[in-house]
């Protein structure tokens, strides 16, 4: 499925070919810190399925406890996280941050990862009072 999106200020835009059956939620603590939220939702694409249309993201290389390095990209102006990818030579896998995709309503997650570090309240969100327009 073809998707497109970009950062909040509009300087960075991309398009990608993703598999909607492989959209996931990640509850790892790195995703919590890097997204500034409780979890992150990600769609994956291969290197040749991702195309930057405008702008140049800033890159932060995250070092995991396993020693694995991964580039985290974001807009240097508005701070929107855009995607992560492997360090060095390809073939790379891109993990697109779903909140930046225009088609995000169509991309419901199919699995959750790192549930051991999921926030205790995450399953209760559906029962919370709903405020604002539907
Ligand atoms: Zn921006
Ligand atoms: Zn994660």
Image (tube, rainbow, N blue to C red):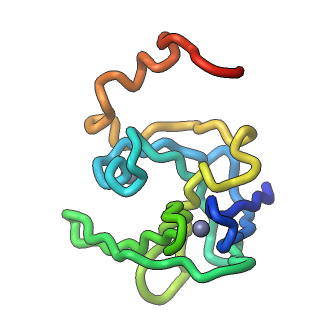
Q: Quadrant of residue 54?
A: bottom right
Query: Relative to residue 2, is residue 104 depicted above or below?
Result: above
- 129 sits left or right of 123 in the view: right
Q: In screen coordinates, is 54 left or right of 88?
A: right
Estimate the x, y position of residue 15 in percent, counting from the top left: 74, 67
Q: How many marks?
A: 0
- Furthest toward the bottom, the residue is 89
Q: In which quarter of the image is the N terminus?
A: bottom right
Tell me which residue sits at (42%, 16%) in the image. 124
Quarter of the picture containing the C terminus is top right
Residue at 52% over, 84% down: 90
Q: Residue at x 31, y 54 (%)?
A: 30
Pinpoint residue 123: horizontal percent, then vertical percent: 42, 20
Q: Pick the residue in front: 74 or 90.
A: 74
Image coords of residue 88 (percent x, y): 43, 87
Up the image or down, 36 lies above or below 62; here it is above
Q: Which of 55 and 86 is in front in this view?
A: 55
- Residue 117 location, x and y as percent? 27, 38
Q: Which residue lies furthest to the left in this view?
A: 65
Query: Relative to residue 88, is residue 26 depicted above or below?
Result: above
Please tell me which residue is depicted at 48% across the width and 67% down the height of the picture.
Answer: 84
User: Which is more toward the observer, 47 or 28?
Assistant: 28
Residue 132 located left or right of residue 103: left
In this rendering, would 90 be left or right of 20? left
């Amino acid at each position: 499925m073809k998707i497109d999106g970009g950062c909040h200020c509009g300087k960075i835009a991309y398009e990608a070919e993703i598999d909607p059956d492989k959209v996931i939620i990640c509850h790892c603590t790195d995703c919590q810190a890097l997204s500034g939220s409780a979890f992150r939702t990600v769609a994956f694409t291969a290197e040749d399925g991702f195309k930057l249309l405008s702008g140049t993201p800033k890159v932060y290389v995250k070092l995991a406890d396993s020693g694995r390095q991964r580039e985290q990209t974001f807009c240097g102006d508005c701070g929107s996280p855009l995607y992560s990818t492997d360090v060095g030579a390809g073939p790379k896998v891109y993990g697109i941050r779903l909140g930046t995709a225009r088609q995000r309503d169509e991309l419901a997650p199919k699995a959750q990862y790192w549930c051991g570090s999921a926030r205790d309240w995450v399953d209760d969100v559906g029962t919370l009072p709903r405020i604002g327009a539907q």
